Structures are given as C-alpha cells and as structure tokens.
Image (cartoon, helix red, strand yellow):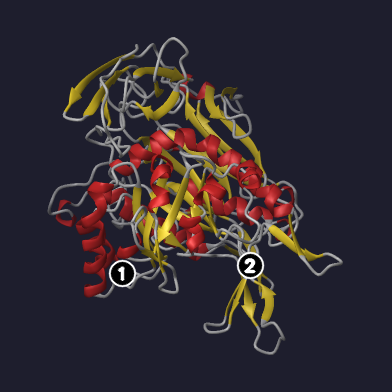
Amino acid sequence: MLIRTVALAAVVFDIPFSIHAQVSKGQQLLLNRGLQIQGLSTPDNYLHLDTYSNASYTATDWSGESSGNAGMISDFQGPPPGFAWSRWVADESSMPGMATGYTGNGVPFSRTNEIPYFSQLISLQLADEWNLNDDTTRTRLVNWFNSVQTNWPNTLLFHNNWGSQIADAQLADFYTRAHPDMLFFDTYPWQSQWDGSAPDHIGAVISGPPTSWYGDLRRYREHAKGAGIPLGIYRQVFHSVQDYNTTVYRDPSKSELRLNTFAALAFNVKFFSDFLYNSSAGSLFTKTFNGSGDSVISTNGLYVEITDINKRALNFGRALLALKPAYDLHNTNAALYPNGFPPGPASDNANFPPGITTSIQYLRGKHISGGVTNFSDVPNSFLADPDVAGSNPAGTGQAYTWWESDKNDPYLRGWVVTNKAGIKNNGLLGDAIIAWFKPLDENLDGTAYTNEIYMMVVNGLTSPDGTAADCLQQIRLNFVDTTATSKLLMLDPVSGQVVTNSLPLVTSTRRQLAVDLNGGDAVLFKFNTGAPFVGFIPPTRAQLSARKQGTTIVLSVQGTLGARYLVQTSPSLSSPTWTILTSVVLTSSPYVLTDASAAGARYYRAVGIP
C-alpha cells in the first residue's frame, strides 16, 4: 500500500517503535536488526570494509576516541547512510554528533559529520569497565543513561564490565535505575600459564573446558532475564601478556572460537563484539614484512574459521532472537518464596535447592589429571545431579547436572556423548550442553500455538590446537515415541533453512536424534507440533496506513505476527526509487512507527520478506 505524505521539514531521522508489552526496546531492536556480530575496530591497522563484511560482521564497532572515528567515518562506512556501525563513548562529552568531542588525549574535535549516518547506528557502549561497586561512580553512570535515553530511541545503549567485576546487588541496582537496553560483559577464557623465567613470560597452554566463563555467562544470563533485556559479550580474538597481573591471553584455537560463539548462544547471548578485530594483537590477521621493511597484513586460518562461524551464528540468530530461556525448576516449599512461586515447573525432589540452573543441562566430559580420570568440574550455579551416583556408581558413564524428566520438555529420556574423532582429550568423551528455549513473546509464532519448546545442543569438546573436526563428537538424544518426536524441525546452520528430520525408532518406545558436531558447533531444533519455526514465519500481504501527527508521519503496519516486513519510501511513483526506512518483525499487529524525516512528497510501502 502506498501513502503520499505532505512536504515536511525535518533534520532528524527517528523511528520510535511501538513495543509489545512483553518485548523490551533492546529485544525489539535486535529482532528488527538481527543478531549482532561486530568487531571492535580502529580506523588504522588496515581496516578494509570488504574484508570485514565478507566475514559476515554486521556492523563496525569503533573503539577509542581517536579523531578517525568521527573525522573519517565516511572513509570506512561509505556514503550515508552507509554500513551499519556502533562505537564506544568514553564519557558524557563524547556522544555521537556533538559539536565538540574529545580524543583519548583530551583534544577537542567536532562529531557533527556522524549525523548523516545516525540511521545506521546500532549501539553505543557508554564507557567501559567502570567500578560500579562504588556508589558515586554507579550513580554517575545511571545519570548518564537517564539523560541520553530519549535521544536514542533506535540505538542500543549499554555498559560493559568484566565478568566478575561487579557484585550482584550493585549490578542489579545499576540496571534497575539506569534502564540500559542490554547487559554486556567480557571474560576471556583462552589462556596460557604465566612463566616468570621465560623471556616472553608465556608458559604452558591452559586447556580444558572454560568453566569460569560458563559461570559468568550463567550469572549475566540470569540478570538479563530478570531485567527483560538482551545479553551481549566480547569474544576473544586477541593475545596479550599482562605482566602487571601475570595473565597470559593466547589466540583461541578453531574449536575454542566456535565454542566461544555457540555456547554463548546457548546461554542466550544475542550480541557479539570481537576484542579486537584489527589491532596488532588481533588473532585474525598475520603481520609480515616485505623487502622494503613495510608491514603487510594478511588474513589467516582463524579469519577463515570465524567467517564460517559468523555465518552459522547469523543463521541461528534469526530464530534465537525470537526465543528466551525456558524456566528453571523451583522448590515446592512455599516458605522459600514469600512473594509466591516463580513461573515454571516445580521439582519432584523436596530437597531441590533454589537458585540453580536447570533450563541448561551440562553434560560433564572427562579428563585425565594426575593419572586419574575425572569428570569436568560443574560451573557455578549448576549442581551435579544427585541421581548420578546411584545410576552410575563406577563412574564409567556420563555425569551431568540436575535434570528431571518432563520438566523442560515432555520427551527427553536420555543421552549418549561419544568422542567420535578420538584424536583429542585422550579419546575420552568431552562436555556437551543442552539448552531449552521458548518464544520470547507468544505472538512470535502466531496466536494458534503456545508454550512451544526449542532445544539447542552444543559440542563442548575443544582443544588448543588442531582443527575443529579433531574434536568431533556424536551426541545422541533419546525421546519418547510420539507424533511430535517422529520428526524434528531443525535449523540447518549452513543453509539457514528449516529442514525436517525424521527420527528413527531405536526401541519400541524410543526415537533417537544423533548429531555429529565438530568442536564447539551446535544444532537448534523444535518438536513437530504443527507450530511454525520462530523467525521463519511467512508474511502475508501487508496493510499500511499513515496519519500526520505534528511534524511526523505515523505509520501503522498490519500483517502476520512474527513475520518480517520492510517499510520503504520513494519520492515518486513514476520512476520509484525505494529505500528502506526500517525492517520490523511484528510483535503486534498493527505495529506502529513514525518517520520524522519525511521532507517533500513521499510514498510508503510495506513488503513482506520470507
């Protein structure tokens, strides 16, 4: 449907969205924009936009406060509105578009040349790793967020801390008062031992599961769930020897980089930024010197790996952005919950300890330490299942964290993990992760279905050397034989398409899913209930209406709930040139947005995209 507007004078592009009650601003923006995979970049060190975009990065994330970030934005983003971008903001005086900003050295410069690129501004990180345990510092950051939020209705505003930096109470106080659009943290798990006697202080490689990182993921996942906002992390793509705290960060291996991505997705992460993309300490490029002594930067094998990882993550993200974690179990003792039971199922065990994670199950791999075979440690806020000792007294099978049948889903009855490659970990089975999800909003798969269940399975076996295929594991899940389990709808991470996978009967009452996953890789699926796969709802023809409100045009889009539509504009119909105003996923119908940039005669249309 085409709408012609009257001529308007406007200098600001603005699309404040009408958000469904259960979907926050941050969640809606990511639904519209897609999963974010960014690389923290500097305007030097051989940044080339084609190399960047070819690796399926979704937006440039500018670091620091050098004049190049604003002064040369057109050199890297292209003509306005340009390639999507984000950036750090060091302090209150350096917001985008300010007539005066300051470099890291305190030198003033203008940021007004960022303004033509505002429609492609994805996110702003307001400062980095401030000590929010300090009341004065935390209040300063709260005041900063509250002072700028209304000016950035289409931009994710967030702050970053390292994983264990801020205590729970202070973190909760921050987001309760500041209302950030997203929580974000950095924990870099891939390390080597510090060796004070070595010339470079780099000792033996530290391998094995990133247990502490899992604990940080779980902690921030819980806070983000409670606040109803997305979760983001920095991925590790750098190396550094930090003599001031005797820490050695090493380049991740191919399997470790995959786990850094897909395990994070299983823990409900929706936004990635790589630390760092193109610095001299970055992992994705190799520096050599030619005969003239000039340095030459070339992509390496890890760059090739991350290109494939990013494509797979974006394919998963189309569905995962419309999903949220299933509920954890709770105890049936009402005295433990003076404000009423939390949502979700009750445990069948009267001794169930509140506060542990059961919506993710950690299947514990094995390793040899001191000549003894041991199970992997349990991450923080998970608990070893008490039934393991009774069912597996010799410790020869699979250990796992707390799980009860018929709680996260009504079908799963068992699992087997096998180190199929047998090359790494002394041939012993490695970790695996099972995560349960449900729709972020019931409108996202229409109104005919409720309480749909999705599962994500991750191969947690990694090695600091070799290929991801060297860590290949087969993960088999046994389900009760029902119509819903006879076939699974699976999201193919390579093609990005939903495919139907028939499950064979392995006994008279059980069907089995068997997946072979390289180290760190994952699979996402739902049961065959007749409900569509979120993120893949086919659109019907849109109905579009418009009205004038002051100096803006208010648009109303009606269409299929959960489907994606492009809202486009053109200055004429005789020779139309359609440009995208915005992309929207309908969490409500009608879905309302405004265009405050409508200058001159203008036509609108809404186009459904599959």
Residue 203 visible in the snapshot: yes
Question: Which mark, residue 145?
Answer: none
Q: Determine which quarter of the picture holds residue 289.
A: bottom right
Report the amino acid beneath label 2. Answer: Ala
User: Residue 69's x, y, as percent?
Assistant: 48, 57
Q: Which of the two residues, 150 or 357, is positioned nearer the viewer here?
A: 150
Instruction: Tell which residue pokes out farthest to the bottom in this image.
Output: 197
Judge from the rendering whether residue 400 lies leftward or rightward of residue 516; answer left or right: left
On the picture, is 171 further left or further right than 73? left
Relative vertical location of residue 320 with respect to residue 234 in this rendering, above or below? above
Say if residue 402 shows up in the picture.
Answer: no
Q: Residues within 10 Å of mark 1 (few under 14, many from 20)?
A: few
Identify the residue at image location x=59%, y=39%.
312
- Residue 123 in percent (x, y) is at 39, 49
| Quadrant in the picture for residue 500 | top right
Q: Secondary structure at mark 1?
A: loop
Q: Residue 553, percent across and down?
A: 24, 25
Position in image of residue 50 (x %, y %): 64, 43
Q: Going by the picture, which residue comes out furthest to the left?
A: 338
The residue sitting at 74% across, 53% down in the picture is: 301
Viewer-closest of 254 and 557: 557
Which residue corresponds to mark 1? 167
- Name which residue type carries label 1: Ala
User: Reading the chain from its start, which is encountered first: label 2 or label 1?
Assistant: 1
Residue at the disc numbered 2: 281
* Quadrant of the image containing the N terminus: top left
Q: Is residue 158 above or below residue 80?
A: below
State the SS at label 2. loop
Q: Nearer the observer, disc 2 or disc 1?
A: 2
